[in-house]
Amino acid sequence: MSAVENQSMPSDQSAEDLAHKPAQNEPNAGVRRRSFMKALGGVAGGVAVMSAAAKRVQATGGSGWSYVLDDISDDKLIDMYDKMLKIRWWEEGIKEVFLGGKDDMYGVIHLYIGEEAVACGAIGALNEDDFIASHHRGHGHLIAKGGDLDKMSAEIFFRETGYNKGYGGSMHITDMSKGILGMNGIVGVSHMLAAGAAHGIKVRGTNQVAVAFGGDGSVNNGWFYGALRNAALYKLPFISIVENNGFQVSIPAVETNPVRDLSKIAHGLDIPGYTVDGQDTLAMYSVMKTAVERARAGLGPTLIEAKTYRFYDHAGLSGAKSGVLGAFGLPYRSDKDLMAWIANDPLPKYRNTLVSIGVLTEEKANQMEADVKKQVAASIDFARKSPKPQQDMGLSNVYAQGAVAPSQMFA
Amino acid sequence: MAPKPGRFAVIEAIQQEMQRDQNLSLWWWIRPTAVSPFGKVIDLHREFGQDRVPQYTPIDEEWFVGAAAGAAMSGVPCIANPGYMCMTRAFDLVFNQIGKLRHMTGGQASMPFVLWQDGAGRTPGMAGQHSDAGQEALFAGLPGVKVVVPSNPHDAKGLMIAAIRDPDPVIFYHYGAINRVRIDVPDDAYAIKIGEANIVQEGTDITIVGIGPSMLDVNEAAKTLKADGVNAEIIDIRSIKPMPAAQIAASVRKTGKLLVVDHGHETMGTSAEIIARAAIDVPGAKFARIAFPDAPPPGNREMIAWMTPDATRTVDAAKKMVAS
């Protein structure tokens, strides 16, 4: 849809109106799966109420986020699982490298493990040419958007072959070729950068959308509001996803924000705001699909809050053990809470759903996991064997051309 | 009196000033506690309560700085500590409000405000936004504020107390690297005069000036130079605004040579101002500086180490200047 066509859309058309339009480019409904989902009821979260007649249905609770499985291709469903596995096992692989102590690792890592469903469900609803802007805990967003594991591992090792050629490290991995505006070490800026990219989309007249990922901490300063408010004002194709993992660094969200369901912030801006189970890949996918349709239709931004949890510490590997999922014994949170969240681990949950509806077999799922582990091991091997950058490379890439002068030595 | 880590020394300073001034308040996004090497715990939140020292705060630099400024001009002296990665986030508040209000209101508004600004320093592996140094020069370019950069825990305590007692806004630049400098820190409160440099070592061959974290390199270089027969005068600038230009000029008049070592950037950095003032005051002297190149800090360890001035480069530069 061009920008001109966008302008012809009635500005007061609601997302609900759109939601009942037939989907385009969606596969045929599978009767068997639909019947199954009827029986499944609330188990799959995002599809609590089913209607065989409608392509879209309204969920219970009035949050408006539901999307029938019939509308999602098997390839897409499997791809989202593949990306979840890659996030999980790539980060576990990097964790083992750090814990192993043999690779002289340095720098800081913020593990995304536990939050995989948010990135994979949300990005699963995007096209390849859509933009995302990520934050310090963003390995998952990179991988979900198609990030290359070899280049990611090499960047963690600060090697020349890494995504950022050793300039950036874990916190800043960027792949402009895939619409990834980058991970970023500054809290809250992802909202601004993505909203700005959404403005750029309008200028260029394309049909892309731009998505910001931020944590619950990123809601605690002005950039978040500025981005959302102005995106609403200009009806930008922008989606703000707040990954509420319950902690701003190590401070409980309840201590830094008077609002419990952060999606309520949208209400004051007269835009849709949804709070979603961030451990449910399909719920994330479906709410995101609704937001993407609204954005592409020129109706403006959506705020999505995903309730989720990080299985590891804010940064680094305190409490982490080789071969054990999750960081226990951290002073600011309860091990029981962590165990409860691990019991609701998004990976087995989504896998079980895919096996139950016949998209995957146990055997195929095991094979996928084994393949991913091999790719992860290969990526770490690639990083280990990659050369370090030349020490004077820091003078380059300051500007498009040339290098800046060395001033650290007496000439 | 005993050695204390820098963070403990500063929190001890704040504690003593909060005991003295019933209104002095602190905004910090971390619960402000510190433990001394002998196990003495200072917990400012517990001691002074939620209103003066909020226990939990959002990551909201504009709020810390804006709230502290508003409180300060209303008669509640206030300290704000934004994290080191977002030190310029509230820059406009310092530029257009904190530094200007006394002047703009014809002297009515007092601003007993301290920006206790963490500085990252040239840390390997952090990359880009978390390995900066030298931004004190940005603040020093603003009228109406004072800027201090301690290089060790002793000076940190004394300068923090002076900053709190100053009726004008003070930017207190606190680099992590200074925390581990081993130096005795008196238990009692004491103030170090803002605007005065510390002549660390007297000498006649060359004047070497360091700023905050680069003083670690300069002090190390001084030992090597001494062993190699170079009699260097070592100056820790401590305050960059007001700048102790007369002390530096007096030294350069004696030595005829000035080397400035700065972890900040070359262009428009503090080294430029120091050399400009000395050059005007002491015509004919020789001047040089080593500073971080005009590039953001890279994450790779070898890359950032190569770009950062250090003791070896300081010795090398000083010897070449003395020989020339």
Image (tube, helix red, strand yellow):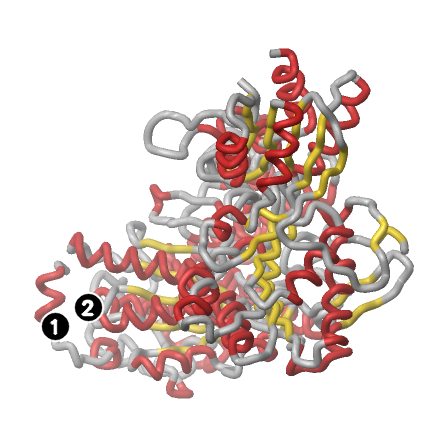
Write down the residue under mark 2. A297
Marker disc for residue A142: none
| Residue A356 in view (yes/no) | no
Marker disc for residue A9: 1
Instruction: Please report whichever mark, 2 or 1, sits nearer to the chain's N-terminal start.
Output: 1
Task: Give me the C-alpha separation between circle 2 and circle 1.
Answer: 7 Å
Q: Compared to B231, does B170 lie above or below?
A: below
Tell me if mark 2 has few (under 14), some (14-19) or many (20+) residues whose alpha carbon lies within 10 angstroms of its own: many
| Residue B178 in view (yes/no) | yes
Q: Is residue A64 left or right of residue B87?
A: left
Q: What residue is drawn where x is 74% and y is 41%?
A: A100
- Which of these two is toward me, A196 or A209? A196
- Which of these two is toward me, A10 or A64? A10
Where residue A368 appears, x then y in whole percent? 52, 49
SS at badge 2? loop
Q: Quadrant of residue A382?
A: top right
The amino acid on which the numbered mark 2 sits, given as a three-letter code, is Ala
User: Mark 2 — on which chain does it sit?
Assistant: A
